[in-house]
Image: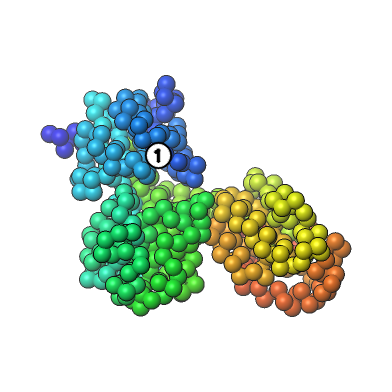
Amino acid sequence: MAEQRAEGTPAGEGRGRERPTEDGVVFGLLGRTLAHSWSPQIHAALGSVPYALVEREPEEVEGFIRHGSWRGLNVTIPYKRRAFELADEHTPAARRLGVANTLVRLADGRILADNTDLTGFAWMLERFCVRELSAQDARSALEGREALVLGSGGASHAVVAALEDAGAHVSVISRSGDDTYETLAERHPDAALVCNATPVGMFPGCPASPVPEGDLARLRGLAGVLDVVYNPTRTGICLAAERLGVPSESGLAMLVSQACRSSERFLGREVDDALAAAVERDLRAQTLNVALIGMPGSGKTTCGKRLARLLKRPFVDLDDAFGLDHGISPAACITERGEAAFRALETETLSRYASRSSLVIACGGGVVTREENYALLRQNSTIVALDRPLEQLSSRGRPLSTSRGVERLARERMGLYRSWANLVLACTGSAAGDAEAIRDALGL
């Protein structure tokens, strides 16, 4: 009987869209720090609304779960185990893992705990193995091979279970015990897959990685890297894999897939796979910054302002942000302190803005001269290079263009602009035309 109730009808099924309760929550995400979350946008697209971010301290969690008037909750770190413990009923997935990321209040008032992280990660894993590893399915790619899971927290349980279901031999890497980060490469050189189930590298602590790139390089059998972190789009460990030529993917697909399964619980109706794919695609497009690079005077600022208005996004001119951050203009800093000092400070400013989401960023012309800036941009941006004929570039107010000459700067930088860019745009002759061309080319 308990299992029948667990699979039963959520309270309120069949009613129209509801207003928030006295707690302000009908559906929502429960956690401790949630500013980074994209769950409200996803659930708005899925129809499980109104959806709130519910930040609670540990001592407040039991009262909210047991006595709040919510209908459905997602639960994130650090409360997944507590959510499982406080529920009355548990699905097989929740019982298997001992943690819950989804709670539903049933018609009789009892609380059902589910774990949709398992199905969410399994879906991402299956797609990754087919798309990136050219396998028929996850089992054919991983059966009998070794997979490493970084971290032993709540998300780790779901990742381990999905990998075991695919036939992999799983080793969990943690800070203590026999399998640690220090011994990872030494003990597991033949690992085929590395999965990050820690929050290391999550915004705003990005692009950090839980494993040094050198250790990944020592895994001679490494075929892929997956990360449950979804913000930024390309996490530190994924960027490291990319540099090594190893396929990788961060956790947006898992986030959307588990949200779809949660929404099905909340609303008592299935979510079509086509809708799930559309939500993932749209969210990725909406959250990736558009970063403009190109020669000094190529029109990055004027085009960026136009593009930001078209897309209804905030605009950041990196030179203006530099002045606010450091109390001196880029031109004055170069003249008074030298280019090397300016470049180091420019990277500091870039790191603060490039990790954010949904911005239009106009970069300084020399941003490509520091290799570390590429990872900062790449982590969460589509990079667009503006290509304007050299004879149309002005050097007024630009000390490097004046001292070195536009032609010399172009010889030094044009190859970098092209290699960094996801899109190279031949300028149309107007800022408005350039902005519209970028919008259309990126499908925004």
Residue 255 position, x and y percent, is 40, 50
Q: Is residue 153 visible?
A: yes
Residue marked by disc 1:
31
The residue sitting at 27% across, 53% down in the picture is 157
The residue sitting at 72% across, 63% down in the picture is 342
Residue at the far left: name it: 1
Q: Is residue 48 visible?
A: no
Q: Split into 4 quadrants, where in the image is the N terminus?
A: top left
Residue 96, above or below 408: above
Residue 314, above or below 295: above
Q: Name the colour scheme.
A: rainbow
Circle 1 packing at 10 Å, graded few (<14), some (14-19), many (20+), is many
Q: Quadrant of residue 417?
A: bottom right
Residue 232 position, x and y percent, is 50, 55
372 relative to 156 in the view: left or right: right
31 relative to 377 in the view: left or right: left
Q: Quadrant of residue 430?
A: bottom right
